[in-house]
Amino acid sequence: MSTEVKQNDLVFKLDYSKVYWNSRLDHEREVLVEGFEPDSEIWDVFAGIGPFALVAAVKGCNVFANDLNPESHHYCKMNYKLNAKKFGKRCEQLVAQCSNLDAREFIRQRMASHAVPLSYPLLELKLILLQANSTRRRVHVIMNLPAR
């Protein structure tokens, strides 16, 4: 059951039988991304097909999108490409930054890229990354899971 959904001036392709999608989260996405600075680094741990990731990328954030579901991962990359004009030259980089990993492994890899010791609780992650990152880029971690 493949379809396309349009939200936030973006097109999202998806197959309802293989991935999760909730159009009612549109407002929450806007509110969350409103608080991001354009040069922020975003870790979307459970990115799905990319609704938070793409909206943040349009704002100019450096987004790392991850989802354990291989179909979601596939559609996230596809959705970046479908909306390539919005990202310009950054599109290839954003697609390359899509991961298909377990959430713990994704966070470990992102933290290692910032040379942050892995013994810190996740709640302290934002402060530690700001201290460890010489460019002082703000890092936001999104962990949005579907309700059951």
Image (tube, rainbow, N blue to C red):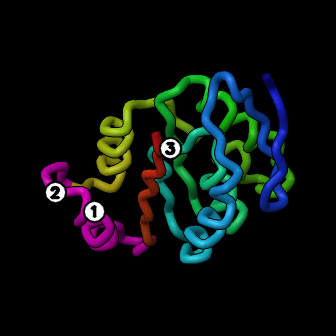
Q: Quadrant of residue 25?
A: bottom right
Which residue appears at 60% of the width and 69% of the height? 33
Camera-nearest residue between 91 and 46: 46
The earlier-in-sequence mark between 3 and 2 is: 2
Callouts 2 and 1 close, C-beta under 8 Å: yes
**Residue beneath label 2, please?**
120
Instruction: Identify the amino acid type marked 1.
Output: Leu
Q: Is residue 69 above or below residue 130?
A: above
Q: Position of residue 13 (x, y in %)?
A: 79, 36
Q: Which of label 3 and label 1 is nearer to you?
A: 3
Which residue appears at 84% of the width and 50% of the height? 6
Q: Which secondary structure, mark 1?
A: helix
Decide: few, some or many residues near mark 3? Use Cα within 10 Å; few <14, some 14-19, many ≥20: few
Q: Is residue 60 above or below residue 85?
A: below
Q: Position of residue 125 (x, y in %)?
A: 28, 62
Tag shown at residue 146? 3
Q: Which secondary structure, mark 3?
A: loop
Camera-nearest residue between 98 and 26: 26
Instruction: Identify the amino acid type marked 3.
Output: Pro
Instruction: Identify the amino acid type marked 2.
Output: Tyr
Tag shown at residue 125? 1
Q: Which secondary structure, mark 2?
A: loop
Q: Is residue 127 above or below residue 42?
A: below
Stretch in magenta: 117-137
